[in-house]
Amino acid sequence: MPTFLNITDSDFDVKFAAFLGAKREQDSDVHAVVAGIIADVRNRGDAAVIALTSKFDHLDLTSETLAFSTAEMDAAIASVPLAEKTALELAAARIKAYHEKQLPKDARWTDDTGADLGWRWSAVDRAGLYVPGGLASYPSSVLMNAIPATVAGVKNLTICAPTPNGKVNPLVLLAARLSGVETVYRIGGAQAIAAMAYGTGTIQPVDKITGPGNAFVAEAKRQVFGQVGIDMIAGPSEILVIADKDNNADWIALDLLSQAEHDETAQSILITDDAEFGQAVVGAVEKRLQTLERRKIAGKSWADFGAVISVETLDQAAELSNRIAPEHLEICVTDAEGLAQKCVHAGAIFIGAYTPEAIGDYVGGPNHVLPTGRSARFSSGLNVLDFMKKTTISRMTPASLRAIGPAAETLAISESLEAHGLSIRARLDALNNE
């Protein structure tokens, strides 16, 4: 059974704090293993990647077959049923349209001293996108990672998508092509992250790596950060639903299960101001778990990490939501828009009973690569800016240097950085001697 908490209980704060601090990641000391894999790839390049792919994915490759050929991609894409192709095309179009609105603008202005200031945006040169394989092979992840990169203007995009035992998901390759990516390597794990970070001979090193993965992939991203940029270190998926009694309990149950079915460490939380409705949702969850295809995974997630929290007011629900800072937040109450304004820490917010989180996973438009583990308190979901960087611009005139240079010289002297001050003083003296 899930955890039940009631804000009116005298020990609620203690129990809620313990609930927030509970560890969900599977205990596994992967640091040393990943470090060894990265060192191997750095030292042996293609040979290491090929050997590790044979070991972990049971797939024998050569340097020439690390990537899918155009003919292989064409053949796989041709096998995609029309309905799935059409759905993926709709998703790609909506995701592109949404992310195009995120493009930032350059700026340039002259201040009151005559100094010319501003900034300009530019895309990273190369990006590598990781797409999980096997049971967790999601074409939607391709779209969510690749489309913001192409919208940002990244010219060189590659994908690493493992194909255990040579099993290929044609939808992944179609999603790559719809996103404008033609280079897809059939490798995965920490070795794929290392290959994209350092290069292997066949695989060129990139500037930024994004995309979800298992504990080994996450640890590899952590270890290569600094050599390359990364999007985030993502943990298990999570959803928080705030719902009042004027909802369909079965709908809310399905929304909770939509994340629970991801993996056994996912977390689904319901906050409601009606305890009786909360019990109705629990009953609906149990009923659905009797027939759900992934009921073993979802059932363990719900039993180990699920929670139903009863509150007296919806303002209390918003306060608890901000403390949880969930990856996904659904708000299903009468004044959903009003409550959403009070929920400031969430990766993505889904407003109203007709906006299930699953829409956001596929065709809503916003990105589904989101901060987990309460990191929505300080970070955002994947977006166009993740593939861009801002360069500041400054241009002093003689007049502006006369106006602000002495202050800079003073601060340099106060920090005992003599050359800093002298570099400014030399110019001021030249101007004063004119």
Image (spheres, rainbow, N blue to C red):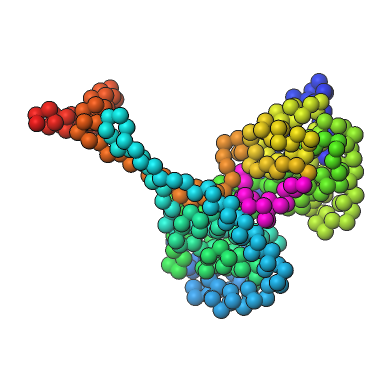
Of residues 199 and 355, the one drawn nearer to the viewer in this rendering: 355
Task: Give the left or right position of residue 226, taking residue 333 as reference.
Answer: left
Residue 194, how many percent across, how many down? 50, 57
Q: Is residue 123 visible?
A: yes
Q: Which of the image's four quarters has the N terminus?
A: top right
Does residue 314 belong to the magenta stretch?
no
- Residue 410, given in percent of the width and then of the height, sits at 25, 23
Residue located 62% across and 49% down the image: 366
Span colored in magenta: 354-373
Can you say whether 40 is above or below 372 in the image?
Answer: below
Name the chief secondary structure element in magenta. loop
Above or below, 134 against 273 in this view is: below
Q: Quadrant of residue 132?
A: bottom right
Horizontal side, residue 80 vs residue 36: left or right: right
Q: Residue at x 16, y 33 (%)?
A: 427
Q: What residue is drawn where x is 61% and y is 43%?
A: 371
Residue shown at 84% from the left, 56% from the top: 292
Residue 278: which quarter of the image?
top right
The verdict on residue 372 being magenta is yes
Q: Where residue 160 sits: x, y (%)?
A: 55, 63
Q: Quadrant of the C terminus?
A: top left
Front residue of 319 and 56 = 319
Q: Tell me residue 431's x, y (percent).
A: 14, 31
